[in-house]
Amino acid sequence: MSERDLMDSLPPVAANGLLDRRLFMKSIAAGGVGALTVPVLADPVGKDQPSWLLAPGQGAQGYGTPSRHEQLVRWIKPQWPLGATIQGLAFTPHQGLTGTYTPSGLHFEVNHHGIPDIDPNLHSLVIHGMVDRPLKFTVESLDYYPTLTRSHFLECSGNSGALWADEPIDALLDQTHGLLSGSEWTGVSLATLLDEAGVQAEGKWIIAEGADSGSLSRSIPMEKAMDDSFIALYQNGERLRPGQGYPMRLFNPGFEGNTSVKWLRSLRVTDRPAMTKFETANYTDLMPDGKALQFSLKLEVKSVITRPSNATVLPKKNAVYEVTGLAWSGSGRIRKVEVSADGGATWAEAELQGPVLPIMLTRFRLPWRWDGSPAILQSRATDETGRLQPTRTQLLDARGKHGHYHYHAIHSWSVDENGGIAHVYA
Ligand SMILES: Nc1nc2c(c(=O)[nH]1)N[C@H]1C(S)=C(S)[C@@H](COP(=O)(O)O)O[C@H]1N2
Ligand SMILES: [Mo]
């Protein structure tokens, strides 16, 4: 089938060149519809052999590292105001990644008081307060409990905070969406440990405290703690990295990242929240009426196109590109992601990469034929509870213009006639 016939067999599903999500499956049989032309070779083997074919290569490393030709690094110097007050930020470079699991070395980090250098043999976790039996767990003792493994995203509620600004920032995706990563976490259910300690009837909250110098503390509702919270000990199969909370952290699936207290040393059961610095001075949401929302813990439904992005230029007109990105929700699974190439006037449903897991990054893909004229690419996600990602206007109408956290509006990339891409508000 020629490329033309292929296009005709699967006509556009939305304006400005969005094509049926099954196109890529058909195009494998048809010989490809990629945007870069690959030459047909007269002599497929050739005479000149590259140097690496002529002599044995180097030995294996004790701990593997990426190819020296791959320079993908986390961005650690924020270009927007919030970060200026936090020393230990690192942003995941989603513009250069694919899949849904973030390599551990590229996981984002927010360290409000730096990374403590903890000796696991000297670290412990105490559960105390309104419990029948106060308990102390060493790292080793937790290894004897039944473990669970969950794939979850972690997102700082300050992720995309730069997009509250009046003008769209000219920065790569790490700066706007890089306080978000996805991992496989292994650890021990918090309910198991709380049951062993015996939570008393008045115990409605848990104050979780970290072993960093500023003792970051957050109040967690007992309902959440008994539902799906866990103590994470491993990440992507290996022990937690120091930046992720080594040797143990609290993990509250779908809640704002700040509540997943790293370097966890204490869980105190109480009858009320502690009103710590991080739930009063920080991580509250200023509303249009001047009042602030507290304990807005659950993360919203959100998505972003990671390729194409402003990290690249579209190399060729009248070619088919894969539009791909990530969608996630603090409330469960992603049900649907739609893509628009005309600034939100028409939408087409994207292919979701399975398995679609609850409270985990979900990758979407859709073929798009760019005819060379200006376009605005957007994605919007719907989760299994029916929550739909709002437009920027809807978000500002609801939350006002002085937000700092929980920005989750539809994100827009403009494409100009030269294939240049920019972050815009549409
Ligand atoms: N003890 C402690 N826990 C902490 C923090 C911290 O600075 N100290 N940062 C919090 C914030 S603001 C976020 S968003 C997440 C980030 O987790 P990560 O650094 O593993 O990505 O950890 C949270 N837990
Ligand atoms: Mo955060």
Image (cartoon, grey):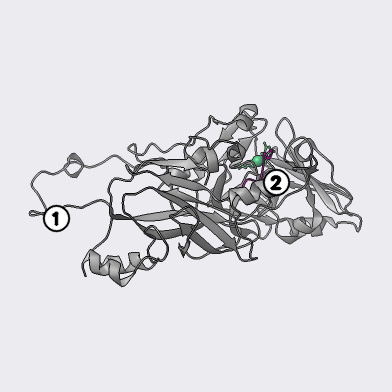
Q: Give the camera-side residue of 265 and 113.
A: 113
Q: Position of residue 366 (x, y in %)?
A: 41, 60
Q: Look at mark 2 in the image and give the residue it sits on.
A: 399
Q: Give the image quarter of residue 193.
A: bottom right
Q: Are marks 1 and 2 in contact (CB under 8 Å)?
A: no
Q: Is residue 405 magenta?
A: yes
> Which residue in the protein does label 1 denote?
40
> Please, what secondary structure does the residue beneath circle 1 have?
loop
Residue 39 coordinates in the image, percent (x, y): 16, 52
For ligand 1, the image quadrant comes to top right
Q: Is residue 405 at all visible to an observer of this figure?
A: yes
User: Is 266 one of the magenta-colored residues?
Assistant: no
Q: Residues within 10 Å of mark 1 (few under 14, many from 20)?
A: few
Does 310 appear above or below 147? above
Q: Give residue 64's position: percent from left, percent from top.
A: 41, 42
Residue at x 79% of width, y 56% of height:
194
Q: Amino acid at mark 2?
A: Arg
Which region is colored magenta?
402-408
**Secondary-structure class at tag 2:** helix
Label 1 beta carbon less than 8 Å to ligand 1 = no
Residue at screen point 26% across, 61% down: 32
